[in-house]
Image (cartoon, grey):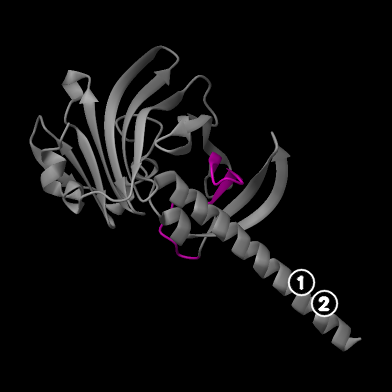
């Protein structure tokens, strides 16, 4: 009997470990697919509130898991405002005061340009990969494709603000939604992606929306007007010099 219990225990551990590994693999592949090896894109961001709405055009560069540069090109009053994520550091530049400011880690969760996306959301930091433990909760078939439901819980002492993140990822590595929960496991905001079509040589969601869980008719929408996925980009793009003088 003891031998049987031991065998059952070993099998259960093996299955659990395999599920854990599968969840981590799914998240990592989705993250890598989203960012690609490198990319250059033009995005229209619209911040919508019940009584007002404003839009801006952004040029964005990304490289690898942690490097990104976002520069506002329109409207004219905001042109040149930019945000750089390089390695573990993040900087912002305001051309009106001609100052580059390094953001402390506590500012990573703050709103970017008054939108519902945080600095961390914008940079799509690899924190989701490094700071969370992922568990596969469910698998469903939606429009002939598997969709994985994954729960991500922060590792002990991880420097993150979310108590939990829930993701839906399609079998072809496309992230469909991401729900962010506070420390009390109450939903705070949700990001959804749609309008999946060929762009830059691969299937990619061209529209993204971040909305608060407790507010009606408040959201920020990203629309990719153009995106090109590349094998590499010059490392000099992701420097504070280029932050102040981007090629826009």
Secondary structure beneath label 2? helix
Q: Residues within 10 Å of mark 1 (few under 14, many from 20)?
A: few
Asked if one can make out residue 209 in the rendered structure from this viewpoint, the answer is no
Residue 226 percent across, percent down from the top left? 35, 29
- Residue under label 2: 8
Quadrant containing the N terminus is: bottom right
Task: Classify residue 140 by image quadrant.
Answer: top right
Which residue is situated farthest in the top direction here?
51
Residue at 53% x, 53% y is: 27
Q: Is residue 177 left or right of residue 61?
A: right
Residue 157 percent across, percent down from the top left? 45, 65
Q: Residues within 10 Å of mark 2 (few under 14, many from 20)?
A: few
- Residue under label 1: 12
Question: Considering depth in this image, is 135 or 215 the residue closer to the camera?
Answer: 135
Secondary structure beneath label 1? helix
In magenta, the rendered stretch is: 156-179
Residue 9 percent across, percent down from the top left? 78, 77
Task: Classify residue 225 by image quadrant.
Answer: top left
Asked if one can make out residue 42 in the rendered structure from this viewpoint, the answer is yes
Whether label 1 touches label 2, CB < 8 Å: yes
Quadrant containing the C terminus is: top left
Residue at 24% x, 40% y is: 83
């Amino acid at each position: 009997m003891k031998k049987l219990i031991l065998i059952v225990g070993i099998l259960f551990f093996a299955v659990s470990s395999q599920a854990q590994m599968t969840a981590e693999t799914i998240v990592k592949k989705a993250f890598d697919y989203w960012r690609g090896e490198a990319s250059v894109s033009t995005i229209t961001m619209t911040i919508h509130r019940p009584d007002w709405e404003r839009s801006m055009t952004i040029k964005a560069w990304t490289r690898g898991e942690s490097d990104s540069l976002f520069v506002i090109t329109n409207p004219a009053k905001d042109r040149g405002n930019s945000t750089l994520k390089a390695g573990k550091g993040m900087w912002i530049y305001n051309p009106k005061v001609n100052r580059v400011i390094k953001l402390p880690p506590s500012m990573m969760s703050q709103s970017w340009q008054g939108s519902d996306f945080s600095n961390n959301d914008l940079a799509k930091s690899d924190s989701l990969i490094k700071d969370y433990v992922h568990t596969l909760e469910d698998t469903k078939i939606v429009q002939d494709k598997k969709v994985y439901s994954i729960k991500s819980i922060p590792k002990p002492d991880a420097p993150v603000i979310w108590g939990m993140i829930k993701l839906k990822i399609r079998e072809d590595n496309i992230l469909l939604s991401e729900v962010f929960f506070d420390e009390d496991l109450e939903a705070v905001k949700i990001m959804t992606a749609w309008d999946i079509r060929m762009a830059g040589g691969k299937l990619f969601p061209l529209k993204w929306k971040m909305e608060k869980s407790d507010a009606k008719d408040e959201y920020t929408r990203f629309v990719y007007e153009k995106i090109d996925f590349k094998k590499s980009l010059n490392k000099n793009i992701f420097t504070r010099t280029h932050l102040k003088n981007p090629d826009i």
